[in-house]
Image (cartoon, rainbow, N blue to C red):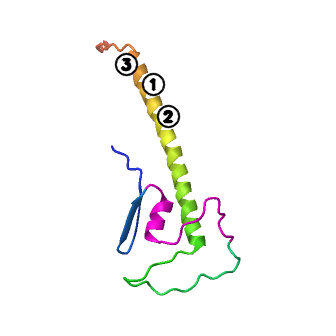
Amino acid sequence: IPELKRVIVSYEDSIAMERTLDEALEKIFTGLAREPGEEPAPQVAGAQAPVLSAPGKEQKLVLSKFDYDKIRHTYRKVLKSQEQLDQSMARYRKELKDLGEILEESPVSLQAEVPSAP
């Protein structure tokens, strides 16, 4: 099975397929780029999200920095979980192969069952 190492992001009529989530989001939602090493903005307790009307076809959606950071954080957690799953599956395949080798090496002989006399 081929493995696609791209991130696909879509929103309304826009679709982006890039190497990273950051690149895909930047392509869809221009202006979200962050400088390397820039820290996420702290969330202010009790802050309300601004009320926005639904964007029309000619409008661009602007994600808040908090939401963007939340998406990035969740994406990284998913990648880490996928890596752990891949490692677990590799161990499982190895153990299954070892079991197969043991079964192949084990001598098996069939004996006819002799009915006992009553």
Q: Is 34 covered by the magenta stretch?
A: yes
| Residue type marked 1 | Asp
Distance from the alpha carbon under mark 3 to that under mark 2: 20 Å
Q: Main secondary structure of the magenta part?
A: loop
**Residue at image point 61% right, 59% down:** 36
Image spot of residue 115 (x, y percent): 29, 14
Mark closer to the chain start, 3 or 1: 1
Image spot of residue 31 (x, y percent): 52, 72
Q: Which residues are magenta?
A: 19-42
Q: Quadrant of the C terminus?
A: top left
Disc assigned to residue 91 = 2
The residue carrying mark 3 is: 104
Mark closer to the chain start, 1 or 2: 2
Q: Looking at this view, is 115 or 65 the one in front? A: 65
Q: Is 10 covered by the magenta stretch?
A: no
Image spot of residue 26 (x, y percent): 48, 66
| Residue type marked 2 | Arg
Distance from the alpha carbon under mark 1 to that under mark 2: 11 Å
Q: Quadrant of the N terminus?
A: top left
Q: Looking at this view, is 42 or 103 the one in front? A: 42
Other-residue count near label 3 (Cα within 10 Å), few / some / many at <14 / 14–19 / ≥20: few
Mark closer to the chain start, 3 or 2: 2
Question: Is the C-beta separation of discs 1 and 2 under 8 Å?
Answer: no
The residue carrying mark 1 is: 98
